[in-house]
Amino acid sequence: MVLKIALYLALCLAGSAKTAVLPVEKCHLEDSKCMIPAIQKALPVFLDGLPDLGINVMDVLEMDDIKFDISGLQFSLTEGKLKGLKSSIIDDVKWDLKSKKFEIHYHADCTVKGHYTAAGRILVLPITGDGDMKLKLKNLNIKLYISYEVEKGADGKDHIAPKKLDYDFEVVDNAQFSLTNLFNGNKELSDTMLKFLNENWKQISLEFGKPLMDVAAKSIFKNVITFFAKEAIEDIAEV
């Protein structure tokens, strides 16, 4: 799911002079018309991982274990995998050099799989389960808001140092839930719950989606920080 969320897009900000790293055009950071296609082209290269820079593969993204208790629902997800980030379409890039902030807006279709446990209530219905989960997110819209500082690296050059990530997200078209072994395999109760989840996907994705997004964003943010620490601004953007 995200998450598509994810700060990974930031590091693709303008392309790279080193074609072996991110082989795209270098842009002025505030030139949105240049930045959008540059990030779009760099995205699949980055998400495939850059082992020479210590950047891990992010599609498929292996997610850390997730546990949360929200609105009466106790939920956990292990062995989670997020797929689909490489399908992301960059919608907008806004960079402000003076305030040291930038925004990236994008959308994608994503799938989350893993082993779940659930107990408690989802909205008005009780739920128990321990099995496999598959969640399809159709047209997941993400808006990233990143604050950074400019710091000298070991190479004596200026580097972007991301400090804070905020984001908004919305599943626009549809979310499809599939969970096995609900209610200890009771088919009637399981069918009722799955019907409820898929009919109320909008509210459920908004209320319970953020913990999944947070975990994905944290993992991706780590790779972004690593990238910027290795690549100076002058090597990836026009200055």
Image: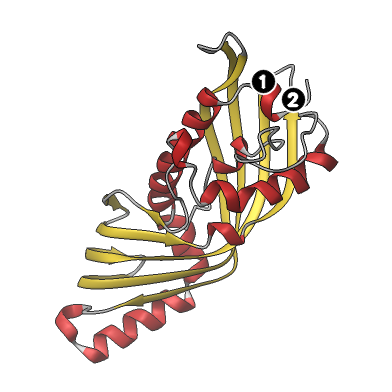
Looking at the picture, tell me which residue is in the foreground, 210 or 193: 210
- The reply, left or right, for residue 94 in relation to residue 148 is right
Which quadrant does the C terminus fall into? Answer: top right
The disc labelled 2 sits on which kind of residue? Asp
The spot of residue 162 in percent (x, y) is 54, 25
Q: Secondary structure at mark 1?
A: loop
Would you name the residue on which mark 2 appears?
96
Looking at the picture, tell me which residue is in the foreground, 177 or 109: 109
- The reply, left or right, for residue 239 in relation to residue 231 is right
Q: Secondary structure at mark 2?
A: strand
Q: On the image, which quarter does residue 10 sit in? A: top right
Residue at 32 percent across and 71 percent down: it is 133
Residue at 58 percent across and 26 percent down: it is 231
Looking at the picture, tell me which residue is in the foreground, 203 or 141: 141
Residue 100 numbered mark, or none:
1
The spot of residue 113 in percent (x, y) is 36, 67
- The reply, left or right, for residue 59 in relation to residue 141 is left
